[in-house]
Image: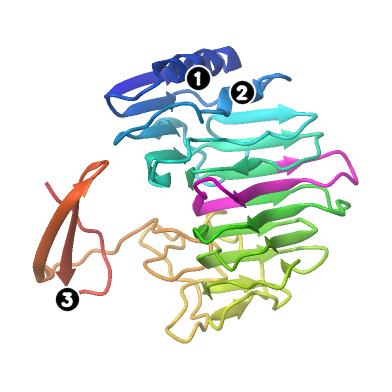
Amino acid sequence: MDIKYIGNGGDWAEFSSWSEYFKALGTLTEDVICEFVDDREYIKPEGAHNDMDFSGVDFGPYQLIIHAADGVKHNGDFGNGARLVYYGTDWHGIYSPLGPDRDQFLIEDLSFEGRGFRGMGLGTSKGVHYNRVIVLCDPDPGRGASAFALLNSASTPPRLTSCRGHCTDVLATSGRGLLVQSYNTTPIDIDGLTISGFFNGVVLSGSQDSVGSINNVVATDCIDDCFAFQSAIGYSSASHNASDDGTHPGTDGVLITADPFEGDGYTPSQGGQLDVEGINTGAILGADGNPFALIRAIGAYPTYIPADSVAPILTNPTSEGHFQGLLCKVDTDEAYGVLFAV
């Protein structure tokens, strides 16, 4: 495994140098990790858009991971951890090749910030899996800004899990927390997202009903509809979403009537866990007093698993080849928990 560490006073040139090194590999012969190891800002200079364009690399069966080390993760709060910051213009996207499974390109536990800018935040991302990524849009007053823009065209579509986006400009008239443009039949998947402070929270446009699933999404404090539709298409499936204006899509949803960012600022406690009918059952607290979610919790991800002294019964184990080594499956008689394998 090829691991490179980024962390020397928050110098963007370190990341830029790694990007050039990675792209020069051409074809991967092993998994590659780029790890940020310090709690600092990395300010992207103008003209450095190509540093996040990896479309010319042949991933083969291997994986690229760009993430923050354990000690410098944001933990859901803006201004913490390794932060990639940009001014003036949009991010111009994060790109991967057309071929690989999107889980082969994983970006997780990083914070992105746009200041004094207008544009698309993380841009027209292609073939990328964002996991526990947060985006803060701090545009000039009255200038539209978006946190996530997911484009599903001829490329491999992205995936979004357990992410968060926020806009500080209440005067923005065109900002969107999540923009989904769907143009082919390969699904875009969103599972676990909190959006606040934009003109529209989640916007769906395009010509194909290929969004796949949009689940466990919270959108609040929007000037216009929290969930907006700009075309005739809908969602292939949508469940366990919430908003404070009742526009959430899907048959299972809940209306937010209080601050969804109570508690730890990352897991919406007011949204709590939803029952099988999509009804809010209230916040569930772990032993540390913070909200946690096991299943179907809007805008949340598992932060705490309660103790269980009764072992589950595991049956029907299967395995098959996978780019990460081996994909294993097993049946269990318990509804939730974490499965470990050696």
Q: What residue type is labelled 3?
A: Asp
Q: How crowded is mark 1: few (under 14 residues within 10 Å), some or many (20 or more)?
A: some
Whichever of labels 2 and 3 marks the residue nearer the N terminus, that label is 2
Q: Nearer the viewer, mark 3 or mark 1?
A: 1
- Residue 50's disc is 2
The answer to which image quadrant residue 67 occupies is: top left
Left or right: where 112 falls relative to 68:
right
Q: Real-space Cα distance between discs 2 and 1?
A: 9 Å
Which amino acid, mark 2? Asn
Circle 3 residues within 10 Å: few <14, some 14–19, many ≥20: few
Instruction: Identify which residue, 50 or 292, lies in the foreground.
Output: 50
Q: In this view, does 308 lie to the left or right of 221?
A: left
Q: Are marks 3 and 1 in contact (CB under 8 Å)?
A: no
Residue lying farthest bottom?
277
Q: Give the percent coordinates (x, y) of residue 7.
A: 48, 17
Q: Against 250, is 202 above or below?
A: above
- Start and end of the magenta stretch? 137-164
Q: Is residue 71 above or below residue 261?
A: above
Q: Which of marks 2 and 3 is in front?
A: 2
Query: Residue 16: within the magenta?
Result: no
Q: Name the residue under label 3.
A: 333
Q: Which residue is label 1 attached to?
A: 19
